[in-house]
Amino acid sequence: MTNWQPDLEGRSGPRYAAIADALAAEVAAGRFKPGERLPTHRDLAWRLGVTVGTVSRAYAEAERRGLVSGEVGRGTYVRGPQRPESYFVHDRRDADPAAIDLGVAVPPPGASDGFLGPALEALAKDPQAAALLGYQPAAGKLEHRAAGAEWLARRGFEVAPERVIVTNGGNHGIAVALAATTRPGDRVLIERLSYAVIHPIARMLGLRLEGIAMDQHGVRPEAVEAACRTSDARALYCIPTLQNPTTAVMPEARRRAIAEVAERHDLAVLEDDIFALLAESPPSPIARFAPERTYYITSLSKTLAPGLRVGYVAGPADAVENLAGAVRATCMMASPIPAEIASRWIRDGTAERILEATRRELDRRRTRALEILDAWHLDCPPGSPFAWLHLPEPWRAVDFTAAAKRRGVIVAPAEAFAVGRGEVPHGVRIGLGPPRDRGLLEQALQRLADLLRDGLDKSFGTIV
């Protein structure tokens, strides 16, 4: 444990913020190593002559900034200057360029190959296409919104085009829905482990995230109920189908229960259904059971192509103007040229062909993952573009991730998805989609299997 004592001289503002600022400066200067343990709350409070509550608040602020992570009963550890979402971006500066990246949740490449050229050629020959270079309505062209409604109908969710808003991908859709349903300082309930990009979005909007207990079926309705009774929560964000990162699929009865809780407590539900079209016979979305308060979010990035930044948000009829206003405030309008390509692909069946090819390839990759890692507890329902590996004793997620990286494989640890300071399960998410070659994926999975067999001793040497 470090004997760190921050120099607060000359730092204005509340003491807790000054402590967090000093820690940020130390991390940026490289004076801490990732994984280094900070003084206990009580110890640092005694050294600085402040209350334990001030230090607790300072550490919480540092965690909010992505500087540290806390584990109940173990202490607070320096995470480093990287943001939690840095586990998922491809341009990791410290990553071995030869490493096999299984750290991101994307569809396998190749399914959309050969379709973009003809689409662009047809668009270039269309005399009406020049109109796409002008401003469009903030909610999107009605034809694009109608294509979005058609895409949602493939999921079994029928909605009028007038209730669909076009966004620049799923992340933008999340930000737009949050901006339309909350105000700075509001509390948003979220699964205890969830999509990492929700953190920077919440910070940007000034929102407070509260992690909610989960089980093998996703977020628990009774936990949502309890949180609503004891807090001023305004919204719930959840991923009911192929939950990211755990792969959980919420049963229909639980979806109905969530809808009932939301109704009782006037809670907006932000349903991220981005993986649902990959899943095998998923239950009906929550939006079907609570259409008057659910904001249904999806995009084409995880089903067709990550670079096709086109998403759709279907909200209650009386929320369309607020959603459109959030689009206008963030980007004026979703880019109409990608939206036009997406609309043509949806209408002419190209999107369905790409989707089916993606499903077939994911099925092959899932089969190999289950075969190679059959000796361990791996969750990977049909259609999932990633798997959740429950680590055996004595592995911790951060240790396994570091050991896997030394063997040339990148995976995403549970800590990257954690909300708040509670205990984090010992698990890692393994992306099945990133490698272009299936053989490369099998090679990476075999390295992980060998690592699990070797255990900690061979990876780290003697543990004392």
Image (cartoon, rainbow, N blue to C red):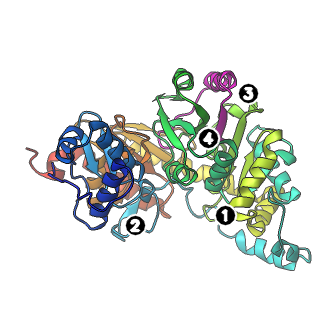
User: On the image, which quarter does residue 281 sit in?
Assistant: top right
Asked if residue 340 is positioned above or below residue 290 in the image, the reply reads: below
Amino acid type shown at disc 2: Arg
Q: For this view, does 15 lie left or right of residue 119?
A: left
Q: Nearer the viewer, mark 2 or mark 4?
A: 2
| Magenta span of residues | 244-271
Q: Nearer the viewer, mark 1 or mark 4?
A: 1
Q: For this view, does 443 lie left or right of residue 156?
A: left
Circle 3/circle 4 CB separation < 8 Å:
no
List the residue tagged with mark 3.
289
List the residue tagged with mark 2.
92
List the residue tagged with mark 1.
308
Residue drawn at (38%, 60%) of the image: 82
List the residue tagged with mark 4.
279
Residue drawn at (36%, 71%) of the image: 97
Q: Along the line of sight, which residue is nearer the eye, 157 or 219?
A: 219
Pointer 3 or 1: first along the chain: 3
Amino acid type shown at disc 1: Leu
Q: Can residue 407 be seen here?
A: no
For the residues marked 3 and 1, what is the alpha-carbon distance in whole angstroms?
Answer: 30 Å
Pointer 1 or 4: first along the chain: 4
Q: Where's the C terminus, which quadrant? A: top left
